[in-house]
């Protein structure tokens, strides 16, 4: 599967952005999906994940209550809605896919097999 992330840009603190991850080459219903981010000089970290069917989600504590992950398997797309943005949310955001047959979200970076190219989010105070 190939992943293409989009929707990044600049926002003021307190604002919102909506990231999309469009998949091609396979149907994402076979994949657990996730979003990760990497700030300059830092490790890539988990942001949010969603199970294959979309019924289960998981969030990093730092974004819980502000970000929402969703998926539309028919459209082969995953969305990360980011509200109440903070300057510390500034990073390159990556979508990722893990081919597996279970039905739980995955938080570990090394469990994901496929990665998109990343989209930059910049939040100013």
Image (cartoon, grey):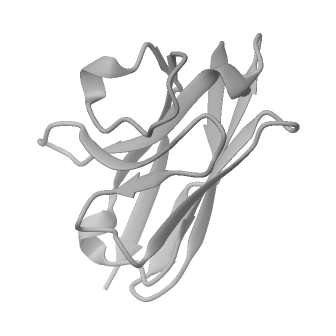
Q: Nearer the viewer, residue 53 or 68?
A: 53
User: Residue 4, located in which quarter of the rendered image?
Assistant: top right
Residue drawn at point x = 27 percent, y = 58 percent:
60
- Compared with 30, 73 (above or below) is below
Residue drawn at point x = 52 percent, y = 33 percent:
103
Image spot of residue 21 (x, y percent) = 65, 39
Image spot of residue 15 (x, y percent) = 51, 84
Q: Nearer the viewer, residue 86 or 27?
A: 27
Q: Is residue 51 visible?
A: yes
Residue drawn at point x = 45 percent, y = 58 percent:
121
User: Residue 3, located in which quarter of the rendered image?
Assistant: top right
Identify the image quadrant of the N terminus: top right
Q: Is residue 118 visible?
A: no
Please give the count of numbered marks on the rendered protein.
Answer: 0
- Residue farthest toward the front in the current orientation of the protein: 102
User: Residue 66, located in which quarter of the rendered image?
Assistant: bottom left
86 left or right of 61? right
Residue drawn at point x = 79 percent, y = 33 percent:
76
92 left or right of 56? left
Image spot of residue 112 (x, y percent) = 39, 20
């Amino acid at each position: 599967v190939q992943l293409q992330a989009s929707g990044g840009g600049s926002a003021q603190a307190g604002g919102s952005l909506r990231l999309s991850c469009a998949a091609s080459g396979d149907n994402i219903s076979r994949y657990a999906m996730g979003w990760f981010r990497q700030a300059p000089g830092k490790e890539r970290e988990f942001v949010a994940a969603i199970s294959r069917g979309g019924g289960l989600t998981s969030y990093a504590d730092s974004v819980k209550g502000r970000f929402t992950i969703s998926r539309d398997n028919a459209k082969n797309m995953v969305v990360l809605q980011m509200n109440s943005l903070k300057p510390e949310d500034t990073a390159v955001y990556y979508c990722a896919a893990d081919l597996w047959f279970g039905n739980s979200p995955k938080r570990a970076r090394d469990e994901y097999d496929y990665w998109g190219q990343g989209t930059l989010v910049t939040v100013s105070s």
